[in-house]
């Protein structure tokens, strides 16, 4: 399994026959673009973290970050490692007392936590081979313009 480091380019929105769908866009270190359709709450969580906006009370992902820290765990990385029936799969890789713990998680939640903790996001190359784009599609609109 070959992994590539990715950065979060941003949160976008796409209008289709069902309305507006949020999309988080990652760029792998080789330049390939990976759009992942996500829920509105996760889109807001990722977008606000990218903008360094701190809510007056902790949101769910802020709470998860605080729990990880207070338990003395270290979130090492996020891995987006599978795509099955148009659903992406991810794992959080944590260390507690020198023991590695893998936690199954949705990519959107994983990315929201990773952005808050400034930890690396890795994408399995097989996922990129299956779902990547060369560039951000023209119909993707900046998330700021719809919220």
Image (tube, rainbow, N blue to C red):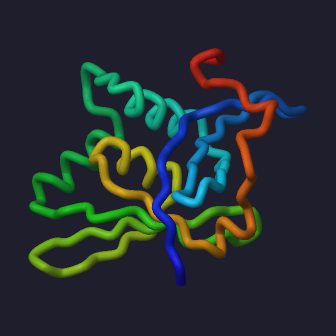
Q: Position of residue 139 (x, y in %)?
A: 81, 31
Q: Position of residue 55 (x, y in %)?
A: 30, 22
User: Given the current orientation, which residue lies at the most extreme right position?
Assistant: 17
Left or right, 112 with respect to 24, comes to left
In the rendered image, the vertical position of residue 122 relative to residue 147, given as above or below = below
Q: Position of residue 120 (x, y in %)?
A: 37, 57
In the rendered image, the vertical position of residue 89 relative to residue 65, given as above or below = below
Name which residue lies at 58% across and 60% down: 30
User: Given the current orientation, which residue lies at the most extreme front position?
Assistant: 30
Left or right, 120 with respect to 27, comes to left
Q: Nearer the viewer, residue 75 or 66?
A: 75
Quadrant of the drawing holding the C terminus: top right
Name which residue lies at 35% across and 40% down: 60
In the rendered image, the vertical position of residue 141 relative to residue 23, given as above or below = above
Q: Position of residue 33 (x, y in %)?
A: 65, 51
Place residue 56 in its image quadrant: top left
Name which residue lies at 52% across and 35% down: 41
Q: Nearer the viewer, residue 103 or 127?
A: 127
């Amino acid at each position: 399994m070959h992994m590539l480091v990715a950065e979060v380019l941003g949160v976008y929105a796409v209008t289709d026959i069902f309305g507006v769908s949020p999309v988080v866009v990652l760029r792998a270190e080789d330049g390939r673009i990976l759009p992942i359709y996500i829920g509105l709450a996760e889109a807001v969580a990722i977008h606000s973290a990218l903008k360094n906006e701190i809510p007056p009370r902790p949101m769910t992902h802020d709470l998860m970050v605080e729990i990880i820290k207070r338990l003395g765990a270290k979130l090492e990385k996020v891995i987006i490692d599978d795509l099955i029936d148009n659903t992406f799969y991810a794992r959080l890789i944590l260390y507690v007392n020198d023991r590695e713990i893998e936690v199954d998680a949705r990519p959107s939640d994983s990315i929201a936590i990773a952005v808050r903790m400034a930890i690396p996001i890795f994408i399995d190359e097989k996922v990129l081979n299956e779902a990547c784009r060369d560039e951000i599609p023209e119909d993707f609109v900046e998330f700021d313009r719809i919220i």
